[in-house]
Amino acid sequence: MISPTCSIEKNHPQFKDLQQYIDSLKINHENPRRKDTLIMTLHRAQKIFGYLPEIVQVFIANHYSIPHADVSGVISFYNFFTTTPKGKIQVNVCLGTACYVNGADKVLQEFEQVIGVRSGQVTEDGKFSIESLRCVGACGLAPVVTINDKVFGKVKAGDVREILEKFFIEEEVAEKEAANV
């Protein structure tokens, strides 16, 4: 993933990865259905770069032979896609109705205070970002927080520091296990 403080240039190695992926799709530029794989390509690009800045959008549009507006339209339609950098550790707090009425706003405020940035921001070192989401589809666990791919349910503001500590311990264990493989 590209660091939030790193500028992306077309000769960046990640573009080679994206190019190989697009080439593997064997897009026929004459076929009006060529955009059928656009969402898959955007997912791959976001996985490679961490977000979808304009230079990546234009790169994809050129390889699909479609206007940049078509690509940016898909990105703005789907909440999953982002055009701003995210931290290595992405904290998401659901503010959907079930989560909100169960105190998610207080949970979000506590994460902001502990991490030191507001929702929608990234720490200067690029380590953390915080986002508020409309709904993660786990209303029975409200309020819900996700950190990277881990889901935490029934979170209270007083749980925030413990959740972060638990996350770091689990990540450390996972890194050690991966190093021993």
Image (cartoon, rainbow, N blue to C red):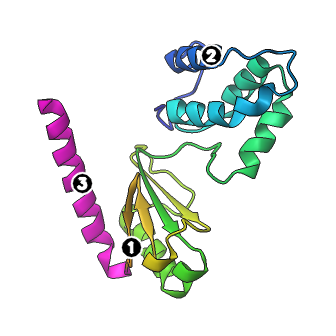
Inspect the image, locate mark 3, and give the three-letter code of the amino acid beneath it.
Answer: Phe
Quadrant of the snapshot with the C terminus: top left
Range of magenta residues: 156-181
The one of 45 and 132 positioned closer to us in this rendering = 45
- The residue that mark 2 highlights is 10
Camera-nearest label, 1 or 3: 1
Quarter holding residue 101: bottom right
Going by the image, does 82 lie left or right of 152? right
Residue 181 position (above or below residue 124): above
Question: Residue 158: x percent and y percent?
Answer: 32, 80
Residue at 81%, 43% in the rendered image: 73
The one of 78 and 27 positioned closer to us in this rendering = 27
Inspect the image, locate mark 1, and give the three-letter code of the amino acid beneath it.
Answer: Gly
Residue 166 falls within the magenta-colored stretch: yes
Q: Residues within 10 Å of mark 1 (few under 14, many from 20)?
A: some
Q: Residues within 10 Å of mark 2 (few under 14, many from 20)?
A: few
Question: Residue 77: x percent and y percent?
Answer: 76, 51
Residue 49 position (above or below residue 114): above
Going by the image, does 144 lie left or right of 22? left
Inspect the image, locate mark 2, and give the three-letter code of the amino acid beneath it.
Answer: Lys
Tell me the distance, in whole angstroms, between the alpha carbons under discs 1 and 2: 41 Å
Q: Earlier in the sequence, mark 1 or mark 2?
A: 2
Instruction: Tell me the tag on residue 153.
Output: 1
Question: Residue 36: x percent and y percent?
Answer: 75, 32
Residue 115 seen anywhere in this rendered image of the structure: yes
